[in-house]
Amino acid sequence: MLTLDRVTKTFRAGAFGGGSVTAVDRVSFAAAPGELVSLIGESGSGKSTIGRMVLGLTEVSAGSLTLDGERVRPGKDFYRRVQGVFQDPFSCYNPVFKADRVFALIRRAYHPGVGDREWADRVEKAVRDVRLDPGQVLGRYPHQLSGGQLQRLLIARALLLDLRFLVADEITSMLDASTRIDVLNLLAGLKERGLGVLYITHDLSLGTYLAEKTVVLRNGRVVERGDTQKVFGNPLHPYTRTLLAAVPRLNQPWTAAVPLDACAYHEGGASPGDDLYETEPGHFVACAALPACGRTRA
Amino acid sequence: MAAVPALLGALLQGDFGISIWVFPTPVGDVLLEALPYTLGLMIPSVLLSWFAGNWIGALSARRKILDNTVLPVGYLLTAMPYMWIAVILAWAFGAQAGWFPLSGGYSLDIQPGWNADFVLDALHHWVLPFLSLFLVALGGWAIGMRNMIIYELESDYSAYLSALGAPQRLIRRYAFRNAVLPQVTGLALQLGVLVAGALVTEIVFAYPGLGSLILAAIQNQDFFLLQGAFLFIVIGVLIANFLIDIVYVVVDPRTRTGMAGGTS
Amino acid sequence: MTTLPDPAPVAAEQPAAKPGSESLHYAVRNPKLLIGLSLVLVLLATGLLGPLLLDGGNPNEYVGPQAAAPDGTYWMGTTTFGQDVYAQFVHGLRATFLVGAVGGAIAAVIAMLVGFLAGYRGGIVDEVLNMLTNVVLVIPALAVLLIINAYLGVRSVAVQGLFIGLTSWPWAARAIRAQTFSLRTREFVDLARLSGSGTWRIVFREIAPNMSSYLFMMFILLFGGSILIASSLDFIGLGPTEGVSLGLMLQSAQQWSALQLGLWWWFIPPGAGITAIVGALYVANVGLDEVFNPKLRES
């Protein structure tokens, strides 16, 4: 459904635009209907930029980004099918208006002919679907609601459209553990209905909880991707190994990552110019950038 | 209208045409004769009021007693039209008290030249117009600086320095340096207003600068003179803007970083 | 739409006060705002009602003894021609408020259009608008107005206000642009884009309401500035040819040597009137700033 092919984003930097920063470098992956792809990376890895490009909020510098074969083009039609939920729920709401205004905006743009009564029913149903009590959350200002409630209201808003794909950018980072599980279960429910989800996170455990596929991003480049089980069961890139080693585990002290002595990309026999090498079906890895690799990727 | 290209060509060569009012003197000469008087009023009053205003504003930001006087006085001064304060000063210290002359750049009975008599006399005539320009601008800068300092003193870095146990004097000094930057920009933005103020002040005092020339040009329908004066003013403001930009780059290190292509 | 398992009950929360009423509470308790606003309203009332309460004749008519000091009949004395200074004053107040309103409104509209567009769109739009702003900024407004007035001649106060509005917007556009820049990165703007809202809809329905206090204060400053510029123009002799304004009063006082003749009642009231209006506006503006910005409130 969603396909990224060598997508690149460069920003101009400096007062006179002399320098440039490559935030996303030839990233490719795909998401099928009913699939949740988790995009994992640390701060500054470019994952939010990718999320914004999928949503059409930021322009793609190079490469192609398609949804169902059509190029991503921001506009009313596109947003009927693709929506986003962001990290900071408080920032997503205009503080001078009540929280339900986010529903009113959808109604104005997409369901102008719907009567007041019917719209109120639809809103109530969507709010209940995200496990909130309409009486407690409707008619309030954002500062009167909690982060979890606001986050779920945003998902409810997305449900009022004919949603096919959802971009969830670190939506659980600012929630406590119990609310987190609720929201993740919501996403699981959406998956079952055939929605595709791009779940952007820096937290590996959350990423593996739901995702069929995982993409590991570092400094704007994909270092490893594939089926979640395979990527985390048998990590072949030093960065992935470091990430895994850093995840706190119950009843186990921290141990350093096992160092790699061979680069799967070069040992596997990748052709020059390939971004990633498929070591086994559904498991792709980039060059490990070890000293033994000799020449580094351009 | 057909004369416009010829006019522009002549302008580029420094030929502003012949003045109608003071025929047959060339406009350029007339303007150049008046220019020193205007600059003599503007430059000292702008610079002194900026420095003094910033200093007073900074002081009043930390002393409540001073603040309670400076603030209302400042607002009063900055709300006064330039020509009104000029008239008030002329009336109070010129007509009533008789300490200063009411008009002109110099007395007509003294020979212009670089002799002590003339210079003293010129200064005597200069005081009131200078004072009226100075006072109004002073009010504006004082208030602006006071607000900026208060803003800086409430910022996170001030709180942090304070928590670290830095002496108040150091924090104030840092706050001052940060607060001065928008004041420099403010100077560039205010140039138009300051020029207008100088022009009307000259008219009140019949001071022989560009202001009085413009008045005469309007009254005598001397369009060449008017255009020439307009150009002089625009060029002067452009030069001043350029100088202020340079000062700003020197004073604010972030602009230098930015210009080299980095981010601060 | 998607169906999901039944919702679990959520704990109740206390409703809090609306943000707007809090501002009102502080507004009526702020002395600067109250004093400033009252003074402006008093002067406005004088300007609107004064001419009606008089005989309503031409304030420039010669009605009384020449150059008479203020007394019971003529509260502000008369000019060298025997005109009633008080009559001129109240008519002048009216003209002054008019030019302030027209000039301030036009400048505010242009500043908002330019500032919002440049701040929200960024990129090439921003650069072009910046260039335009810089050009209008650097050219001294008075000089431009000089030329325009000298060639075209200004008949009415409203037209004068128009020209002033057209030249005094740059600093306000810059300020609005800066604020818009910072607001535009907020995620609720992204959400509005994801809801299919266009540029101007977002600007006026998302961004502007978040800077409403700022915009209002900007208008007040533009209003005051417009009055000052107009009075300077009038003083130089480029004012409207009909009617009377406070600046024109100062001009005739200057022309007819009121200073040398000691006719203080001719030149002090008009300038005092301008100072009072503009000063009161500035003070009210500071009060408003304190109302909207909790950090500035004095305990």
Image (spheres, grey):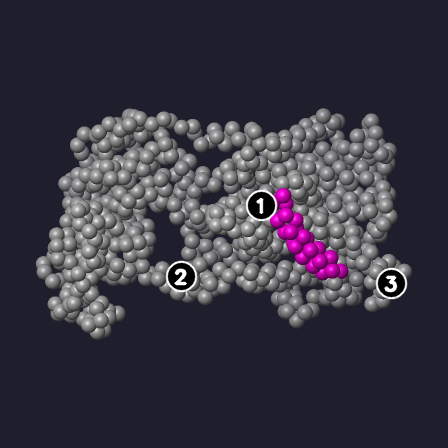
Marks 2, 3 in one chain: no
Can you give x and y, in whole percent of width and height, for residue A218 in the image? 26, 59
Residue B33 occupies which quadrant of the picture? bottom right
Mark 3 highlights which residue? B117
Q: Is residue A265 visible?
A: no
Mark 2 highlights which residue? A13
| Circle 1: element type | helix
Q: Give me the residue at 49% from left, 60% from top.
A: B254
Marks 1, 3 in one chain: yes
User: Mark 1 is on which residue type?
Assistant: Asn
Chain ID at mark 2:
A
Q: Is residue C203 above or below residue C93?
A: below
Q: Give me the residue at 79% from left, 66% from top.
A: B24
Marks 1, 2 in one chain: no
Q: Residue furthest right?
A: B109
Tell me the CA gap for discs 2 and 3.
Answer: 61 Å
Mark 1 highlights which residue? B147
| Circle 2: element type | strand
Residue nearer the viewer, B247 or C145 = B247
Q: Which residues are magenta?
A: B37-63
Tell me the CA gap for discs 1 and 3.
Answer: 44 Å
Q: Earlier in the sequence, mark 1 or mark 3?
A: 3
Chain ID at mark 3:
B
Q: Give me the residue at 82% from left, 27% from top.
A: C73
Q: Give me the residue at 47% from left, 63% from top.
A: B257
Residue C190 occupies which quadrant of the picture? top left
